[in-house]
Image (tube, helix red, strand yellow):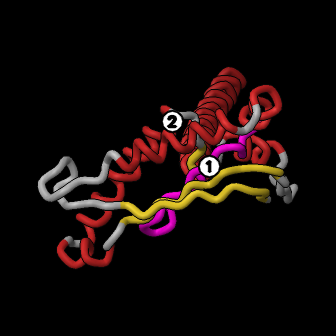
Amino acid sequence: AEAHLRGAFYLGTSVVIAVTKTRMEREQKAQLVLAATEKRLSDNLIRILGYMLPPHVLFEMLRSPDRHFASHIERASILFVEFEGFADITRVLTPDQVINFLNAHFCAFDEICLEHSVTKIETIGAEYVCAVGVVPQDQEDEGDLGYAPILGKLIKAAMGILELQQEEGGEFEHPVAFKMGIHTGPVV
């Protein structure tokens, strides 16, 4: 009877250990899946924020999320680009086509800005805003070279964007003309 009792005890203990191990493995798997999901979401959020903020600003925000900060920059130049007659364009396009139209143009603007080391600031509806003098490298270059080369980068980008203007039947399917303006001065 004692051997029988000992066997039952070992069997019961083995079952408890197996169940506990299975539970722990499930919990570990769930924690790994949760951690992987949180990392993916975090990476996506950082990628999305990267589209909306200059890298040096994003880095500061991630490093000190509770800190509210604004930098005073003595001299920056901002380029504003609008589509001439955008309301007329939207009358002949479906909502999806309007989004595709803007996306195609804004992606082309992004490439031009990247090529000329111009910082994209934001898009607001059908307006595109980019600048020079707002990143630390521009500020260092201004100290070494003066402001003219920095402003020259923005002017080259503006000229590249103007080259995208077209008559009927061009690369983007609809005639496009832009209104542009540049402001230079202190910014916060």
Seen in the image, is 100 located left or right of residue 188?
A: left
Corner quadrant of residue 32: top right
Q: Residues within 10 Å of mark 1 (few under 14, many from 20)?
A: many
Question: What x and y, as percent, mark residue 19?
Answer: 60, 36
User: What whole-number distance in Å separates the C-alpha atoms at marks 2 and 1?
Assistant: 11 Å
* Residue at image point 64% right, 59% down: 183
User: Nearest the camera: 31 or 132?
Assistant: 132
Q: Which residues are magenta?
A: 121-136
Which residue is the extreme one toward the left? 169
Query: Tag 2's secondary structure?
Result: helix
The C terminus: image quadrant: bottom right
Please report the residue visible at 76 percent of the width from the left and 33 percent of the height from the top: 146
Name the amino acid, label 2: Leu
Q: Label 1's element? A: strand
Q: Residue at x 47, y 64 (%)?
A: 127
Mark nearer the viewer, 2 or 1: 1
Q: Are marks 2 and 1 in contact (CB under 8 Å)?
A: no
Residue 66 spot, x, y in % from top left: 85, 56
> Is any atom of residue 66 visible in this view?
no
Q: Is residue 47 left or right of residue 71?
A: left
The N terminus - image quarter: top right
Tell me, for residue 131, which label it has, or none.
1
Q: Residue at x 37, y 44 (%)?
A: 108
Which residue carries the number 2 mark? 114
Q: Would you identify the image quadrant in which residue 90 lies?
A: bottom left
As shown in the figure, which amino acid type bears the numbered disc 1? Ala
